Image (cartoon, helix red, strand yellow):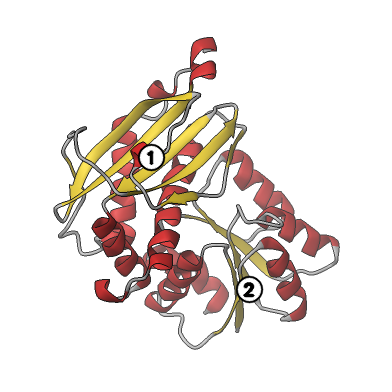
Amino acid sequence: MKILIADDSRVMRQIVTRTLRQAGFDGHDLVEAADGQEAHDKAQSEQPDLVISDWNMPEMTGIEVLRKLRAAGNQVKFGFVTSECTEEMKSAAESAGSAFFIVKPFTAEQFDEVFSPILG
Amino acid sequence: MSVETVVTEDDLAEMVEQVWASYLDPEGVNPLIPTGDDKQTTEVHSTVSITGTWHGHLVYASSTQAARKAAAAFLAMEVEEVGQEDISDVLGELANIVGGNVKAMLPAGCFLSLPTVVMAPDTASYYPAAERISGLWGVWDGEPISISMWQSVKQGETA
């Protein structure tokens, strides 16, 4: 599977990558985006099977990326890994079609739980 | 509304404990130990601002060595390999993670800024319209670390 990891923090992109590996999801094709615009563009051009996105990013927030993709008819499986977690954000994410919502700091066990049904 | 009743020092300690358990001390052998020592000095710091229904800042500060060790742990590198950019990125992420968790405890309708990192002691940054309302001082592997919350004075007066 091809996975797009969108986060403006290089550190967090590395941690997401490492945690995926620790959770046993090796061998997937990983693509990175460093801001919301890049995430949107790569979600279209790279055609990933899964997008793991931060919420708060320069250029475009994660939720804006998701809404724009859905408005364009792109139904890629999309979810958030973010340090911010409020009921309003969770609800906005769900309404926009988000498949998951993981809060930082996270563990490999949480990744396993969320991504096993998606990545197998 | 005073945030002291919403995000206490204990709440901050719990968030920090989660960060340590996830990234900085997954084995549970080297935790951040609260000391309450407000005389301790730091050398680098990072800040995220919170605006909306609550106005203020979350500040993460530490010694350079603690920041270097944190970067090594976050990036799975040796401490000697850590560069300035690594330290800066990790400091920003630490403020972002704790700030995001703080935001979740504040009244609905708050916004979190992207982090600002300053390679200087936290006393180098003044928040002219804010005062320190909560926080903790501690030691990690012998190195000083502090996490503090600063609330807009104007908002505090009208609360």
Nearer to us in this view, B48 or A46: B48
Could you tell whether B109 is left or right of A16 in the image?
A: right
Q: Which residue sits at x=71%, y=71%?
A: A76
Q: Are marks 2 and 1 on the same chain?
A: no
Residue A101 visible in the current orientation:
no
Q: Which residue sits at x=60%, y=47%?
A: A90
Residue A85 visible in the current orientation:
yes
Q: In the figure, residue B65 lies in which quadrant?
A: bottom left
Q: Which residue is mark 2?
A: A50
Identity of the amino acid at label 2? Answer: Leu
Residue B130, how many percent across, how many down? 46, 25
Secondary structure beneath label 2: strand
Residue B63, how many percent across, how many down? 26, 52
Specify the farthest residue to the right. Answer: A72
Could you tell whether B93 is left or right of B158 in the image?
A: left
Q: Which residue sits at x=27%, y=45%?
A: B42
Specify the farthest residue to the top. Answer: B158
Total tally of numbered discs in the picture:
2
